[in-house]
Image (tube, grey):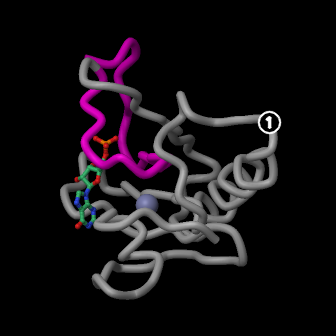
């Protein structure tokens, strides 16, 4: 697994910074967002450092599939699989991307407006 120096989510993956873990496997970890926007707000991140969704290459396929299958598990764990939930990758400033380590937001537990604000 590659990591990036001073990357916040690499430090959470390594257990150097605490987070409330929801799920983990060989490729990904999932933990609660520190500033949740809904009753369920979980961040699913690859253990391997990837900058963002715009940096993904075909060789990252296993990590991408692992993020999505982890999301299925998290939805069940969080009891939103039946009610529904949203999966989001923010990319760049206009989308409000703040942490430069790829992360999939899983948001649910309330009605979610569409289009988003
Ligand atoms: P972005 O805006 O980059 O798509 O999402 C980054 C998310 O990381 C934000 O929702 C923010 O609340 C969350 N976050 C930032 N720092 C921390 C932290 O130290 N711990 C946790 N659990 N979440 C964080
Ligand atoms: Zn990182």
Q: Is residue 90 left or right of residue 97?
A: right
Q: What secondary structure is the magenta-colored segment mainly? A: loop
Read off the residue under disc 1: 58
Q: Is residue 115 shown above or below 49?
A: above
**Nearest the eye: 110 or 55:** 55
Residue at image coords 40%, 32%: 90
Quarter of the image with the C terminus is: top left
Residue at image coords 38%, 57%: 40
Mark 1 lies within 8 Å of ligand 2 (Cβ measured) = no
Q: Residue 106 location, x and y as percent?
A: 48, 49
Q: Residue furthest top?
A: 115
Q: Residue 54 location, x and y as percent?
A: 53, 28
Reply yes or no: does residue 4 show up in magenta. no
Mark 1 lies on a secondary structure that is: helix
Residue at image coords 54%, 34%: 53
Reply yes or no: does residue 107 show up in magenta. yes
Highlighted magenta segment, given as a residue range: 95-117
Q: Is residue 55 shown above or below 8?
A: above
**Nearest the eye: 62 or 25:** 62
Q: Residue 59 location, x and y as percent?
A: 80, 44
Please tell me in which quadrant of the rendered image residue 116 appears.
top left
Please tell me in which quadrant of the rendered image residue 114 appears.
top left
Q: Is residue 30 left or right of residue 99?
A: right
Q: Residues within 10 Å of mark 1 (few under 14, many from 20)?
A: few
Quarter of the image with the N terminus is: bottom right
Task: Give ligand 2's quarter of the image.
Answer: bottom left
């Amino acid at each position: 697994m590659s990591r990036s120096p001073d990357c916040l989510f690499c430090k959470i993956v390594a257990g150097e910074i605490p987070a409330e873990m929801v799920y983990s496997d060989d490729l990904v970890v999932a933990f609660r967002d520190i500033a949740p926007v809904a009753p369920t707000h979980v961040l699913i991140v690859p253990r391997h450092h990837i900058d963002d969704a715009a940096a993904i290459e075909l060789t990252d396929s296993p990590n991408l599939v692992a993020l999505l299958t982890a999301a299925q598990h998290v939805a069940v764990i969080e009891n939103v699989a039946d009610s529904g939930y949203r999966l989001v990758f923010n990319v760049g400033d206009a989308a409000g991307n703040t942490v430069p380590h790829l992360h999939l937001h899983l948001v649910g537990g309330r009605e979610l407006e569409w289009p988003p604000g």
